Amino acid sequence: MSQHYLAAPDRFETERFVLRSYFPGDGAILTEAVESSYDHLAPWMPWAQPSQPQALSEQLARQFRGRYLLATDFVIAVVSPGGDKLLGGTGFHLRHGGLESHTAEIGMWIRASEAGQGLGTAVLEAMLQWGFTQWPWERLVWHCNGKNIASTRTAQKAGLRLEGTLKGVRTEGEIRDTLLFGILKDEWGAQTPPA
């Protein structure tokens, strides 16, 4: 068990969406979002299934909550303000060291019905604001498939800088180029006007 622990904040609200931890009972909205978005997600998200049983989604929601409470991974739901619709998913993932590294990787998917409307950029901007003001992150990173133009544009619009390309990396059974974007807390603060 790590000596480092974080009692992570659970919620960040905007007028358009809420970022929050998954909770028991979220299986139904997770199944509906993934199944309705399968064709949209499948090229980029190998975990997407055309038919995802609600029991599996409920198990995943509970696993996400458990890891959140244990501070080992922070999977975050993007929900409508009323909480009845899952708009996508994001998270702060500890893939670059533990909490002591003060670095997290942001991942994201947006449901098909919300894609192409600026939601991804708005969510990423909110994650940067939340991450650099209420979490201990000093550096946030974003990885994406080099062929995923929408994901690349989302990172650029939110102010992340391209730091490099990993060529020919085997990722989830596929050989691809992975683009690496990042931003430091000080860089984010310099580009964000005071509230």
Image (cartoon, rainbow, N blue to C red):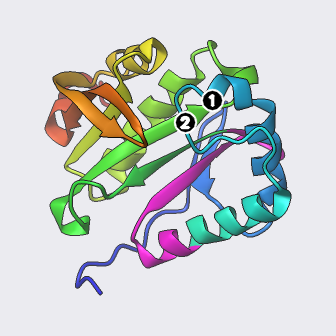
- Left or right of 118, for residue 186: left
Q: In which quarter of the image is the N terminus?
A: bottom left
- Left or right of 96, for residue 110: right
- Left or right of 23, for residue 45: left
Counting other residues with Cα less than 10 Å from the Cα at mark 2, is it few (<14), some (14-19), or many (20 or more)?
Answer: few
Q: What element carries label 2?
A: loop
Q: What element carries label 1?
A: helix
The CA span between labels 2 and 1 is 5 Å
| Residue 73 belongs to the span the image colors magenta | yes
User: Residue sitting at 63 percent across and 29 percent down?
Assistant: 41
Q: What stretch is highlighted in magenta?
A: 66-87
Amino acid type, residue under disc 1 in the picture: Leu
Asked whether 55 or 108 is in front, the reply is: 55
User: Residue sitting at 35 percent across and 73 percent down?
Assistant: 6
Amino acid type, residue under disc 2 in the picture: Met
For label 1, the residue is 41
Assess whether mark 1 and mark 2 are in contact (beta carbons under 8 angstroms).
yes
User: Residue sitting at 71 percent across and 42 percent down?
Assistant: 49
- Residue 102, percent across and down? 21, 58
- Residue 71, percent across and down? 40, 72
Residue 45 marker: 2
